[in-house]
Image (cartoon, grey):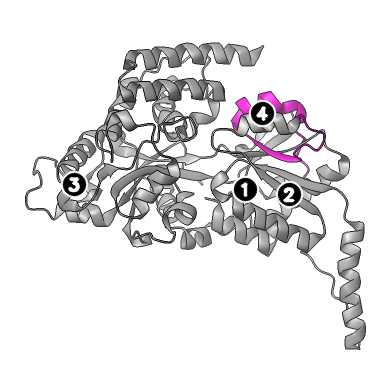
Amino acid sequence: MRKKKLLSFVLCMTTAAMIFAGCSSKKNKDAKDTAKGKVYFLNFKPEIAEYYEDLMKKYTQETGVEAKVVTAADNQYDATLSVEMAKTDAPTIFTVNGYMGYDRWKDSCADLKDTKFYSLLNDKDQALVDGDGVYAIPLMEETYGIICNRQIFAAYFGLEERSTETGCDAIEDINNYDKLKAVVEDMQAHKEELAIDGVFSMPALNATSNWRFTNHLFNVPLNYEYHDAGLADKEEIQFSYAPQMKNIVDLYLDNSVDVRENSANGSVEDAMAEFATGKVAMVQNGTWAWGEQIHVDGSVVSAEDLYFMPIYTGIAGEEKQGLCTGTENYVCVNANASKDDIKASEDFLEWLYTSETGKSFVLAHYGIAPFDGIDNDKIADSNPLVKLALEDINNSDTNNVAWSLTTVPSQNWKDAFGADLLGYAQGSVEWDTVVNNAKQNWASEKAQAEQ
C-alpha cells in the first residue's frame, strides 16, 4: 500500500521610448542568436497531444529554442520509442515506465541529479536512481478508479421498485465488491427507468484501448500480491488474486452497454463519451479524463456530479481501500544527444515547472505535480477529479493502492494478457488459461529482461 503523503528577466531602462523599443528588440534577437541546442520530446500521453504542441510553440516563442513534440499512439509508446531512438535526430526527452523501462534504456539516460529540475522534486524518493545517479524523474502523479455519475445514482436510489437487499441507500454506502455488485446488477435491471444504456461504459478490449484492463485493473491484484509478500517486484507471480480480478472483469462485461461478444468494439474515447453524455453511470479511468474527455462540448456531467470510487474486487479488508495513486511517466534526458541538446532539454524541464506558461500547462493537464512551486490546490480547483483524489490521499481512514503496474515486464506481456482477456470476454478462452498464460509469460519476460 502507498503511504499517504503526498524567469528571471532583464529590464532595459532608458529615458527614451525609442531607445526602450530598440532594447526590447535586441533582447529578442539576442535570445535567438545565443540559443543553443534543441528539444524533442516524445510524448506518452496522446490525450493531451494537441496541448503539448501548443506548449512547444510557446516555449520557442519565449526562449528562441527550437522545440517539438511527437506523440505515440495508445499502447504504442515502446515501439515508437525504439524507432525514434534509432534515428539520427532522436528524442532528447522521453519517458520510461518505472525501473523495467529504465533497465532497457539506461544507456540512453543522462544523470539528472545536479539539475534544477531534480532539485524541485519535493519527494526525492520518487525518482529512479542507479548508484549515485538520478536517471528518471516523475512528471506527475495521477489517480484512477471508477468514475461515477452521482445524478444517475441518486435517480436509482430514488426508485421505489429498486432492490432493498443491496445494503445501500446512497453511493457512499458502497465500500466493497459485494455491495457494488448488488447495486450494479440492480441498476442494470432498471436501466430503462434510469434512461441509460448500461451501468458501465463499453470495455473497448481491443489492442489499442485495453490498457485500462492490462495496466490499471491488473494493478489492483498485483499490488495486493506484492503487499502480502512484502515486496515491490517479483520474478514470478502467483496471480493469487486472480479470482478477485475475475469478479470485477465479469461485473464490467455483464453490465455494460453491449454484450460480451462485442467487447472489442470502440475505444477509450468512445467509452468516455458514453459517460460524458450520461449514457452510463460508471467508467474506470483517472484524473486525466476530466479536461479532455468529460468536461467537453456535449457533456451533461458537471464537476458536482462526479464521485470517485475505489476498484472493489472482493479482497478481504477492501472497505479501507482507497484509489490508485502513482505514476508511470518517468521522464529521462537522452544521454546520447549533443551537450547543447542535453542542456536545452534540462532547461525545458525546469521551465515547465517554474515559468508561468509551463506551470499553467501543468495545472491544466497534469494530475498532482510533486514539485516545489506547484500549487496542487489550483490543479484541484480546475479538475474535480484531482480534488477528489487529494481528498482520498489525505484521508487517514483509507489506504491508497500504489502503481505496481510499473513492474510489468514488457508491452509484449500486456499485449498477450489483453488478447487473452478479450478471448475470455468473447467466450473463446477459459479464465484458467488467462491466469496460467499471465504467470508463464511473466516469468519468461522477466528472465529475458535480465539477460
Determine the residue positioned at 52% across, 50% down: 367
Where 115 falls versus 248 (above or below)? below
- Quick check: is 89 in the magenta stretch? yes
Where's residue 347, x and y in %? 78, 51
Bounds of the magenta segment: 86-115
Q: Which residue is mark 2?
A: 68
Q: Position of 95 compared to 285: left or right?
A: right
Specify which label sits upstream in the sequence, 1 or 4.
4
SS category of the residue bearing label 4: helix
- Is the N terminus in the top left, top right, bottom left or bottom right quadrant? top left
Does the residue at mark 4 contact the one at mark 2 (Cβ under 8 Å)? no
Residue type, numbered disc 3: Lys
State the image quarter where residue 78 is shown. Answer: top right
Callout in the foreground (3, 1): 3
Q: Which is nearer the N-term, disc 3 or disc 1?
A: 1
Identify the mark nearer the N-term, 4 or 2.
2
Q: Position of residue 116 (x, y in %)?
A: 75, 49
**265 with respect to 336 (left or right):** left
Answer few, some or many: residues within 10 Å of disc 4's Cα (few below 14, many 20 plus, some between 14 and 19): many
Q: Which residue is mark 4?
A: 102
Secondary structure category for the residue under label 1 = loop
Q: Nearer the viewer, residue 357 or 275?
A: 275
For the point 52% across and 12% down, the residue is: 443
The residue tagged 1 is: 122
